[in-house]
Amino acid sequence: MTLPTTPGGPWQFGPVTVWCLPHVNGTRGEPQARVLLADQLGGAPDTLPLQRDARGRPELHGPLAHIGTGWSHSHGLLLVAMGEGVRLGVDLEPLRPRPRMVEIIARFFHPAEVAWLLGLDEATRNPWFFRVWCAKEAILKAQGQGISFGLHRLQLAPDAEGRLHLAWCDPELGDAGRWHLHEWQAAADFRAALAWHVM
């Protein structure tokens, strides 16, 4: 599988479409996401039946309850994802130096990931760290709690072709095999990941 590298999108991953938009740093992503979603679904942004659940996860309601959505913004970019019949999460991470990367991996990641990533040389570890972090965030945003759920409660691993997949997860995330994961270079210095499962 070849990962898309062209910035801007929209990208199509199974039933999910992802858009990449410029975004003003320091502002919320929801108002801009509402505009895009309303344009796609019809109606006005302020009447879109979009609400937050008790944990703050965005959900469409009423006649649009069968459509999953989510967004992520960072350093001047906003990703917005939407798909029919799915529960999804999306994450965007800038590729920038992380001086405490080894400490973060050792302290927060699953033991199998710790052994894998810390066994790599630094030049190889750095891109894998961002890929793993971004994918974990996407899965946990879909789940609804975000990283407070615990980064160690799911294990990502590369397959024979170098694609990340969910190798194991806490039962609260359901069966690992139900999760679909797509990752790509959203822009020259940004990684992106989308995770979804059928509702």
Image (cartoon, rainbow, N blue to C red):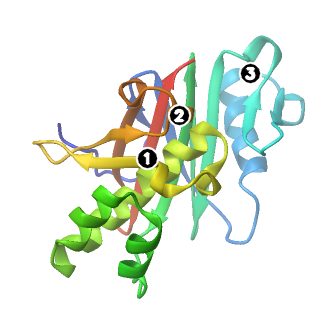
- Taking depth in this image into account, of 14 and 165 the one nearest to the observer is 165
- Taking depth in this image into account, of 26 and 118 the one nearest to the observer is 118
What's the residue at 60%, 38% (across, down)? 143
Would you name the residue on which mark 2 appears? Answer: 173
Would you name the residue on which mark 3 appears? Answer: 42
For label 2, the SS is: helix
Q: Which mark is residue 86?
A: none
Q: Specify the quadrant that holds the N terminus.
A: top left
Q: Amino acid at mark 2?
A: Leu
Callout 1: few (<14), some (14-19), or many (20+) C-alpha neighbours within 10 Å? many
Is the C-beta separation of discs 1 and 2 under 8 Å? yes
Q: Position of residue 109 (x, y in %)?
A: 41, 62
Q: How many marks?
A: 3
- Whether 6 is drawn above or below 28: the answer is above
For label 1, the SS is: strand
Q: Amino acid at mark 3?
A: Gly
Q: Quadrant of residue 41?
A: top right
| Disc 2 versus disc 3: nearer the observer | 2
Would you name the residue on which mark 1 appears? Answer: 154
- Whether 41 is drawn above or below 33: the answer is above
Q: Residue furthest bottom?
A: 99
Callout 2: few (<14), some (14-19), or many (20+) C-alpha neighbours within 10 Å? some
Residue 8 in view (yes/no): no
- Whether 89 is drawn above or below 175: the answer is below
Q: Position of residue 86 (x, y in %)?
A: 55, 22
What's the residue at 36%, 48% (across, down)? 155
Q: Amino acid at mark 1?
A: Leu
Q: CA distance from mark 1 to mark 2?
A: 9 Å
